[in-house]
Each structure stands twice: as C-alpha cells, then as structure tokens.
C-alpha cells in the first residue's frame, strides 16, 4: 500500500451473537500471514476501564488527566474520557496514521456509512441487515442465501480473506 493513502475501512455488521469476534479472530491471522497489517476498531455499548483501581494510570485519569497514554516496550494504550455522547467512527480513525496499517476492520458502528460485510447465521432467525443498508457489499452466512450481493461462507475465513484482498487492498504484483 502507498504510504500517502489512508487505509481502507471495512466493517463486519451483524446482530449480537452471530459470531463477529469469532470470525475476526480467525480472519485476522490469515490476513497477517499474507503481510497485511490490520488495525481494528470495536464499538462497545458497555462502560469499561482498561486500567485498574490502584494503578498510577487509573489514579491520574481519575484526577482529571485525559487522554492518558500508558506505554511500555510492548504496547501503548490511550485512555480518553468521552463526554459528547456516542462517538463516531470517523473520530476514532485518528488512531491509524497514514502508513501504519493496510486495513482497518470495524466491529460495530453498523448504522454508519462505510463498506460492510453482513454476517448471518440461519439458526438465529435474525432479519437481514442489507435490505436497509446499501453500504453492505457482501454477506457471509452459514446457509444458502438468495440476495443481490455476493454470498460468502462465514465458516471459511480464507474465502473471506480472498474477497477482502481483491476488493480492498492494492495489489503489489505490478510493482
């Protein structure tokens, strides 16, 4: 990928319990093995703390510092207090500077406008999302689906990785 181009963003949209995280935990290693650096944004509807009471970072955040950047030789975490309601995806993409990743995968933010793959499991009897969301570009399901979109096998992450590679990533074969 070019270092001057923002990475493509691809969402995985589904109802709760469909297996978004399970699929992504199988898909991301395949993309990594292909030399694709993947960043991820996961939207949570729950309040959470990644630092712990009694730790310095927690005490300093509670004292009013925001953001707090916690860093070691192994990883970095940025903890920012939000007070302006539900954040947008666009506000979160600053975490991925140009050239830092090849692809940003998004779990959640299903009501925002960006390309998504809908995940569907027949046994959940959930309504499809694609009839009401024209940003859905494919469906990954565990059953035969009749739809005006490409249908992928939710249990075949290699197939989904191939689709992503061909749809979203610049080929370096012509370099």
Image: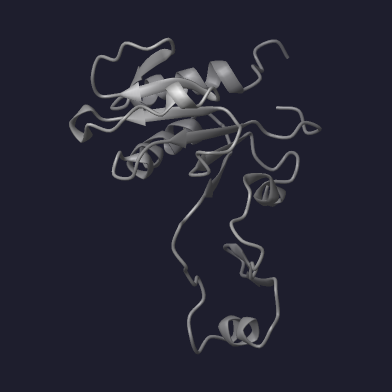
- Taking the spot 59% from the left edge, 87% from the top edge, the residue there is 59
| Along the line of sight, the residue nearer the viewer: 162 or 131 | 131
* Image quarter (top left, top right, bottom left or bottom right) of the N terminus: top right
Residue 114, above or below 152: below
Question: Percent from the top left, x then y, of residue 69?
Answer: 67, 70
Q: How is the image coloured?
A: one colour
Question: Percent from the top left, x then y, of residue 60?
Answer: 64, 85
Question: Percent from the top left, x then y, of residue 92?
Answer: 65, 51
How many numbered circles does the render carry?
Answer: 0
Residue 53 horizontal side relative to residue 120, left or right: right
**Which quarter of the picture shows residue 28?**
top left
Residue 65, above or below 139: below
Question: Percent from the top left, x then y, of residue 11?
Answer: 52, 35
**Which quarter of the picture shows residue 159?**
top left
- Taking the spot 62% from the left edge, 46% from the top edge, the residue there is 89
Which residue ends up furthest to the right in the rendered image? 4
* Image quarter (top left, top right, bottom left or bottom right) of the C terminus: top right
Residue 63, above or below 137: below
Residue 51 horizontal side relative to residue 171, left or right: left
| Along the line of sight, the residue nearer the viewer: 34 or 103 | 103
- Taking the spot 70% from the left edge, 71% from the top edge, the residue there is 67
| Along the line of sight, the residue nearer the viewer: 171 or 17 | 17
Which residue ends up furthest to the left in the rendered image? 123
Residue 2, above or below 79: above
């Amino acid at each position: 990928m070019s270092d001057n181009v923002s990475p493509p963003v691809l969402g995985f949209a589904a109802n709760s319990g469909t297996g978004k995280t399970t699929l992504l935990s199988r898909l991301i290693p395949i993309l990594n093995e292909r030399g694709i650096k993947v960043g991820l944004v996961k939207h949570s509807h729950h309040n959470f703390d990644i630092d712990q009471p009694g730790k310095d970072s927690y005490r300093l955040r509670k004292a009013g510092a925001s953001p707090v950047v916690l860093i070691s030789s192994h990883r970095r975490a940025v903890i920012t207090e939000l007070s302006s309601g539900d954040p947008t995806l666009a506000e979160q993409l600053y975490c991925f500077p140009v050239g830092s990743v090849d692809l940003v995968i998004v779990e959640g933010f299903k009501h925002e406008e960006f390309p998504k793959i809908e995940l569907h499991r027949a046994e959940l009897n959930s309504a499809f999302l694609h009839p009401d969301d024209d940003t859905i570009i494919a469906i990954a399901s565990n059953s035969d689906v009749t739809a005006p979109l490409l249908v992928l096998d939710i249990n075949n992450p290699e197939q989904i990785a191939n689709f992503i590679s061909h749809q979203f990533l610049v080929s370096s074969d012509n370099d």
